[in-house]
Structures are given as C-alpha cells and as structure tokens.
Amino acid sequence: MSQFDNERKSLMMRWHLDGPLFFALLTLVFIGLITLYSADGQDLVLVEGQALKIAFAMGIMCVMAQVNPKTYQHWSVPLYLAGVFFLILVEFFGYTAKGATRWLNLGFTKFQPSEIMKLAVPMAVAWYMANQPMPPRTRNVIIGFAICLVPTLLIAKQPDLGTSILVAVSGVFVVFLSGMSWRIIGAVSAMVAGFIPILWTFLMHDYQRQRVLTLLDEERDPLGKGYHIIQSKIAIGSGGVEGKGWMQGTQSQLEFLPERHTDFIFAVFSEEFGLMGVIGLLALYLFIIGRGLMIAHQAQDNYSKFLAGSITLTFFVYVFVNMGMVSGILPVVGVPLPLISFGGTSLVTLLAGFGILMAISTHKRLLAKQ
Amino acid sequence: MLKRRVAINDPVAESQLFLNRALFAFAFVVVMFGIIVANLYNLQVTRYEEYSTRADGNRIKLVPLAPNRGMVFDRRGVLLAENSPVHSLELIPEQVTDLPATVKALSELISITPEQQADFLDEVKSQRRFKSIALREQLTEQEVATLAVHLHKFRGVALEARLTRHYPYGDLFTHALGYIGKINEKEFKVLDEQNISANYAASRDIGKVGVEKFYEAMLHGKVGYQEVEVNSRGRIIRTLREQAAISGDDLYLSLDLGLQLKAQEVFGERRGAVVVMDPRTGALLAFYSNPSYNPNLFVHGIRGKDYRMLLNSPDRPLVNRMTQGVYPPASTIKPLLAVLGLESGTVTEHTRVPDPGFYRLPNVSRPWRDHFKFGHGYVDVYTGIIKSCDTYFYDLAYKLGVDRMWQFMSNAGYGRKSGIDISEESTGLMPSREWKKRRHKQNWGPGDTINIGIGQGYWSSTPLQLAITTATLINNGARVTPRLGEKFRNSEREGSLLVEKEQVIEVVDPNNWAISREAMRRTVQQEGGTARGAFLGATYSAAGKTGTAQVINMAAGQKYNAKAINERHRDNALYIGFAPHENPEIVVSVILENAGGGGSNAAPVARQMMDYYFSEQYNNPQLPDRAAIAAMQEQRAAALVAREQRYIEEAAAAKLEQEKRKNLPPQSTTDTGTIPPQSNAVTTPTAVSNNSENAAITQEGTNQAAGTPVQNPVLPSSTPAASELPTIGEDAGPDINIDEGPDTAPVENQDIEPEPQGGGR
C-alpha cells in the first residue's frame, strides 16, 4: 500500500518512523533548543552540545524503531532482571554524588541503571500482563505491582524520588491498561493514601520532607527552601498572557531563576512566551500523547498495546509533574520537562521509548501481512 | 479455567477494554492539563500585576548619585573651596588572576604598608567578587604618575578619582570657611530627623564648621538617582533611567583675598584677630584670626598627633578669635558710651569733668585711677575720647547707671549673638543687675558700674562685636547683621545673602552720634590723639579708638611693667576704626593678644589694613599664584610645628625653674609680686593640656579680681574626639568664677587695687 503514498511517507515507512509523532517530537526538541539558548544566557556552546545529544538520542530512537516489537517482548524479562541486578550493585558499589548513590562507575563513564528501568519495568510488566487474560485477576495485579515495586524501592532508596515515581507509574499504567478492575483501583488508591504517612516518616529523606513543606508554603523560607519556587512563580506570573518575548525574560536573563536550563526551564518558557506559548506547548504535548495512545490502540498484540500505552502515559507524567512543580502545585521532585530540559540521559531514555512506540506503530502492518 | 479460556479467546472484548482504558487515560490527561492551564491562568492573568511587580523589584535597584558640592569664591571670584580629584588605587578581585602576587607587584611601585595590604585582603573576602576595592587611597601625584605608566601590565587594577574638598589657601580662610568631613552618626541622626537623610544617600561628607556648615543645605546640592538593572548577584547589567544629581549652589563670600593675605602678613607670629566690615551692609571683607590652621587636615580625618598639637597649643589656633575670643572691650566702648551720655542728656557737648588723675565715689575712700597719673584737667567729651580719659567715663558711667548702659549697649550689639553666618560664636557678656544676681547671687554694686564705664569689669566682647557696635555708631543706631556669604549662584538664579540693617536704637539727635564720630576722627588726626602716631600721613580720613585691656590685676600700688610680667599676662591691644570719616566704607576692629598698648600696637595693624583697602592695589590685586600659595602654606605649617616645639621646650624649662623656686625661701616669690599668688598655674599654660581643667585654671587666676575679671579667649570645655571640631563652650568666657567680697562696696575690702588700667595709652 506504500506505493500509493507520497514519497516522504514511503520514506518514513521504510525507516519505520511514525510521521506525525516524529515531526511533533522534532518540533518539541527545536522549541527546547530555542528556550535553552535564551535560558542559558545565549551560550551557543551549550546549545550545540545539547543539539548533539538530541541528534544522538534521535539516532537511538531510529534504531529502536527498526526492532520488531516481538524482539522487545522476548528481551523484556532478561532486561528487567539485569536492571534489578545493576540496581543492587548500585546499592553496594554505587558512585555517590550530591548525597545520592545513583551511578555505577564503569571507569570510562558513569552509568545510571535506574534510567534503564524506566523502560525495563513497563516492558516486564507488559510481558507479564500480556500473558494473562484481560481483565487480570487480583493475583495477577498483585504480581504486576510486585514487579514494579522491587526496582521502585531500590531507586527510591538511592535516593531518587523523581525516577522512582516515574518507574512506579510506568508499571502501574500497564496494569491499569490491562483492565484492572475499578474496585482494585479504589483499594489501591486507599492503600497509597495510607502509605503516605509511612513514606513521610520512614522512607523520605529530610530534604524531601523540606521540599514538601516548602510546597505548602514557599513564602515560609523565601531565601532558603522557598527561593526556587518563589522565583519560578514570579517568572511565570510576570510573563503574563503574551510573555516578555524570547530572550527578554528578566527573571531568567538576570539569573534570579535557579536551575533555569534544567528542571525549571518551563518557568523560562512561561516568562518569555506567556500563557499563549504555554497553551501551544501543552497542545503539542497533548498531540504526542494522543498519538501515542492511538498507536497503542492500533497495536496488534496486548504486549505492544500495554507497552505503548505505558510509555505514552509515563511521558505525560513527566510533563505534568514538571509543570506542576515549577508552577507550584506539586512538590519539587527532580523531574525534567521532557525533551525541553537540558540534559542527555532523560533525552535518550525518552526518545528510546518513542523509538519503541514507532516500532510498534510501524511493524504492525508487516505482522498483518504474515 | 473456563473463564480464562474465554478471556483469551475474546480479542474484540479485550480490544474494547483497552480502548476504554486508553480513552479514560486520555480524558484524564486532558483534565490534568486543564488543571495546569488553570493554575497558569491564575499566575499569569489573575495575579499578573503582583508577579510583574515582584519581578521588577528583583531586578531594578536605585543607585544614588552624589551631587557636586557648590564651590566657594571670594568677592572677586577667586576660588577658595574647590572640589579636586583624589586618586585611589582599586582592584576588582574577579578580574585579577593572582591577587597576592598583584598586590606584591604593586607594592614595589608605590608604598603600601603591610596593614593596608591586610585590610585590603580582608575587604576582598567580605565583598562581592566584581566590586572594586581600594588598595591605597589619597595617592600623591607622583604615585599616580608611577602607577599610570605601569598600569597596563595589570588586569583588574584601576586608578579611581573621587572629588573631595580642597582649600587652596590653607589656613588663610579657615575660621570663615570651616571645612567638611565624614558624616558621623550624630550628624546622620540630625539629617534623619530633618527628613533629609535621603539627600545624603551618596554623600560622604558634610560641612562641619564655618560657612561650610552654615550654608550646608545650599552647598550640598540634590542627590541624583540611577535606576539600574541588576542580576541575582547584584551586578549592574545596565542603566534604565538616570536622574542627574543637581550640584550645590556656588557661594560668593564678601571676603577679599588680598585683604585677607594682608592681614596674615601683618600679624606674622602675633596672636590676635582682625575684622574688616562694610558698615553699610555688614559684609565682612576680612576675617582673620592668627594663628590659624589648615582645614585640609580635617577633610580626610586629621591624624591624632596633628590634632593634639593644635588642641594643646598655647596659641589656640583652633579658636576663632573673631567670634569665640571674648576680651574686655576696654576703651573702645567710650565713643558709644559718650553717645549714650549725650542722647540721655546726662552730659552735653560742653560738659566738663575735672580729672585729677583718679575718680572717687561719694563715701568710698578708694579711688579709681586714671591711666594718666596726673590727670587731664577739665575734660569734655572730645578730650575724653581723644585722650581716652578714664575719669570722664567713670563719672559718666556712674551718672548713667548700669541699666541704661546695659539697654543701650545690648541694642548696639554687645552681649548678644551677632547673627553671623557661622555657628561658632560666643555671646560675650554685657553685664546687668539681673545677670549678676543670677550668676553670682549678689547685688550689683556702684563699683561694678564704674568698671563698666571703661569697658572692663564683667564686660566682655568679641572682636566681631566691636566691629558691629562701631557700625551701629556709624549708622546712627542701626545695627548690621554681619555676613561672610554675600551671594549664592546656581544655574538658574543668583541671590543676595546680606541682611538689611535694623534701627535698634531710637535717635534723639543725630548730632550726638556725629560728635562721637568726630571725636574718633580727632583721636586719629589731632595732635594728642591716642591713635595719631599710627595714622600719620594717611591719605584718607580715618577715625578710630584705641583700647588697652588689662589681662591680670595689679596688686595695690603696683605699677604695670610689661617687661616684668609673663608674656601671656600682658595687656591686650585693641583698636576700632573706620574710614573715610564722612562716608565710612569700612570698619576695622583689631585685637592683639598680650601686645600692650592699643595705640602703639593694634592701631598700626588697622592702619595697614586701611592703607591696603584705599590703595590702588585693592582694586587691582596682584595675587600670588597657586604654587606660591602652596609654598607659603608649607612654610607656615613648618613654622607652626617649630613654634609648638619651642613652646614645649619653654614650658619644660619653666617647670624646672618652678621646682627650683619651690625649694628656695619664701621671700624670693615677692620678687615677682605682679603675679597674683594663684598664677603659678597660669604661668605655665603650655604645660597644661587643653581641657576643662585648663579653663578652670584660667578662671582661678582671676579669683581675687573683684569686679575686674580677666578674660582671654577660653578654650573648649570638653575634649572632643580627634576627628571632631572642638565645640567651644558658648558662654565659657563670662562663666568665670569670681570670688567676691561683700556686694555693696566690693572695692573696699580688696587687697588688690580695684582700679583697672583701662585707658588708651
């Protein structure tokens, strides 16, 4: 059927790329580069570095898109087990920086196993759930949760709250999409609610507690814990409807805004492009999420459906948590704004996920022919 | 089991279930994005104003800009107080690669003490990295030149220039100009109370003394502001708006540089003061107290050693003798007293009083002596003034009574602040019944009245008051307000600072005033006049009156012998004069401390001032250039130091002498019988530090001088901090503890002769 499509489409198909998704992602990383250029004081070197990382991650995405989803399904369990093994290694031999033990020092580079788990967990849970009937029975649900829980706890212990949340939800989304009954959802919600005090008392580190407290009243400590969020809200609020214009944001250009090129880049964007710009950005994100869910719906086997759905919804969680924390309705957890924030690791993981999504999207027809 | 199998085999239902879940998830995503948008709407639309204001508050700061202080000129526009650049060597730490090495390299070029280096490095630690910090201040021209050559080798090192006050004529105008200095806490509080501290946001200095203080509001100018954008570390990124500072008004003094230089030249090393004033306006043409001091020393904070030298000097250079020096006016009051006598009808132009050489009160056996032992025979008002006959004025004073004299003389300008435009001023003392009652808890005695008749007794005045009262005589009872500042000028306007004279004494017959002035003319121009010798050959018609004020009291039967007594206990020489006689343009008052007779010492000073004023040179002054002035100032500074050194040595020698004398039999003290018994302390004033103790000692020296207090300028009663100007106790002069006998006839019971030697010898 590709003969009847235009040339580009056929090219896209040949490369196993999903056109709408690909262009939406390209637009997003381009917006990211523009914002980054402004956020970091017009430092071209930094932008070039980020562009290289983007190119590298895009390459990974394209490679991942070439792989048949069946292969992913096949490798799900080994990948998961290897990931857990690495996490345990981190626990004992990990490299520590800024009070967190997240890395394995390989000598030539540092490697962060928790990033692998962002994909390995949904793959493993999807693998498990795909082997179960829909809707799953309670026992299957519990096993599914257990698969999530092990790496989540290991990551939370590093500590890395942001990643552990992302890893946990990526697994939970699979269970949800597999048709977990609403009764159980209600029960789990109640359990999570009950878990919060335990989390607060035993599992959370001091700095994490402070972050939560700061969220409740950031003006409590305007120069200390509240500084980030106050400056961020000032940046967003002073942007107004139309924004101050590209490279005109005073909060960002005059460096009042901390971490403006990483986690708080959304504040820079909001300050310079205003509410209109933000709505446009959200529309783009919504389009990507919608497209991802559509791919999931059109996938031909349950594993692909679950995995595609989970990757898409995890992407949404990234967006929501980051925007929520920057605009002051969620506590500050280290989650970047996907594809916009500076940094290579999350970029590679995210685009690798989208590569899998594209593989699912583009390989179904071949499957259908078989 | 069955159920499971059914489930597996129902892909349609599974697909439907997944679709439901996916749709639900998508709806959830939309709702959550809605929440985000709602929150952003709240921030960016609803609370936009609030956050916008806070963003501006973050980035916009106001930087105050110091205004240039107004300059001060003399009457001909010669610059007397200027703003000159002072250079400092400053470093910006973040631009300097190796701070210690740079400092070391710089210290090889110019001298930087280890303390200065340590202070600098401390400062670096406590300041922002991009802020410029001074390593050395007040660089000399030589150092600036040296650094300028080598500066290109250093990164982040700069020569900065700041404007500070400079007084090119040094000690010549000190007592008029005063000086500025760093604003201290007390002054800042005052500024705060007046709600003008914002105007000083960028200013470092404030007028401390003199016209610099009096005209502070005018000279200071208005602070400007720069609205700048700063980043989160406070670094200035750019200037958004600037409101320039408005320079202070320029001040034109009525003083004349040439006349002032003349005064300094005439005085030489002699102690004293001269005031030259225009009697028509009160504008002061010369205002000089010798010795003086260099105000530039105070601008950057004077060194303790220098300050102690000035403070402890027996010559009292810090004292503004024109307004703070209180002296008995002596015979200089006679012309005005004669006016009162004539106006009140107590005497007429032709009234003659016998002068046998002394005056005796009815029922009082002790006489008041005339300065002329054999008397002047029958004396009328002219002779009384021309020859300065004491007996005539003893008699007149007795007839007038203290109340009328007090009323008249107070109005004329004695015993009151003149209203001059500097704040360092003593009231002097015009005694009255109420004053004596209040001060000494004693009744006024007739002897007190008689002492006042020749300007002695409790009466004391400043040289400025002498000039003012002379102007009152010239103006037929209209008193002037003396002014150093003649006009101010700014970019928009020019305004006079002079004050209209005020008719303070009701005139009965203007001729009475003219009689007195005529007598003063004859004092100068007629054979036998006390000032004739000094004014021989004058090309203008001068008038004047001499005065010789006793500083210590003579024991009964003692004759004044200048050679025999301590130099600092000799008589003060006074002179008041004006010229031309018919249409006076200037009034001159002179005091020479411990110089002896007024006619032979003070009058010649006035003569030279007047000669200069009436010479062609006054209108076309040949003034020395800056280099000459600087050289002169250097010379004077060296002379001052040498003089002080000499005093210290003399004091040490005197002390040694005293110790020796103590061990000798008591009769040896009678050799120097002219010195009162208490004067041991007074004879060595150099040995006594300048503090309240000194003042007390000076007072003690006069203890037994009933009705004849000895008054010299009295020094500050407190010891202020080195950087501060000594505040002179305003009524320090009159507040002398005089131990008196019974009030009705004090003269009777004194073992010291009550007769002051007041005449114009």
Image: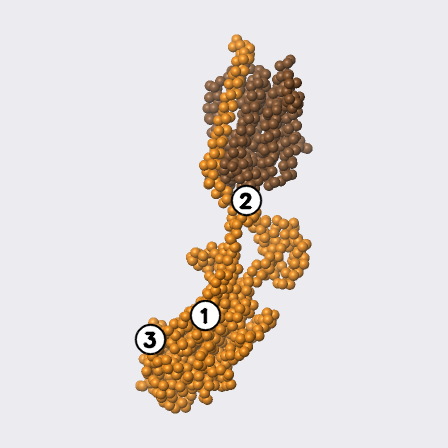
Chain colours: A brown, B orange
The x, y position of residue B740, in whole percent, is 36, 77
Judged by depth in the image, the label closer to the viewer, 2 or 3, is: 2
Q: Tell me, yes or no, whether the two marked residues, 2 and 3, touch with CB atoms within 8 Å.
A: no
State the image quarter where residue B583 is shown: bottom left
Vertical side of B281 occupied by B491: above or below: above
Residue A267 in sight from this viewpoint:
no
Query: Disc 1 versus disc 2: distance between alpha carbons?
Result: 53 Å
Pointer 3: what residue? B433
Mark 3 residue type: Arg
State the image quarter where residue B119 is shown: bottom right
The x, y position of residue B269, in whole percent, is 54, 77
Q: Tell me, yes or no, whether the two marked residues, 1 and 3, touch with CB atoms within 8 Å.
A: no
Secondary structure under the numbered disc 2 in the rendered image: loop
Quadrant holding the C terminus of chain B: bottom left
Pointer 1: what residue? B483
Q: Which residue lies furthest to the top in this view?
A: B2
Mark 1 residue type: Arg
Residue B9 in sight from this viewpoint:
yes
Q: Which of marks 2 and 3 is nearer the N terminus?
A: 2
Q: Say which chain tag 3 marks.
A: B
Disc number placed over residue B724 in the picture, else none: none
Residue at 66% from the left image edge and 22% from the top image edge? A7
Pointer 2: what residue? B232
Judged by depth in the image, the label closer to the viewer, 1 or 3, is: 1
Q: Which of B560 and B536 is in front in this view?
A: B536
Q: Nearer the viewer, residue B298 or B74?
A: B74
The x, y position of residue A189, in whole percent, is 47, 24
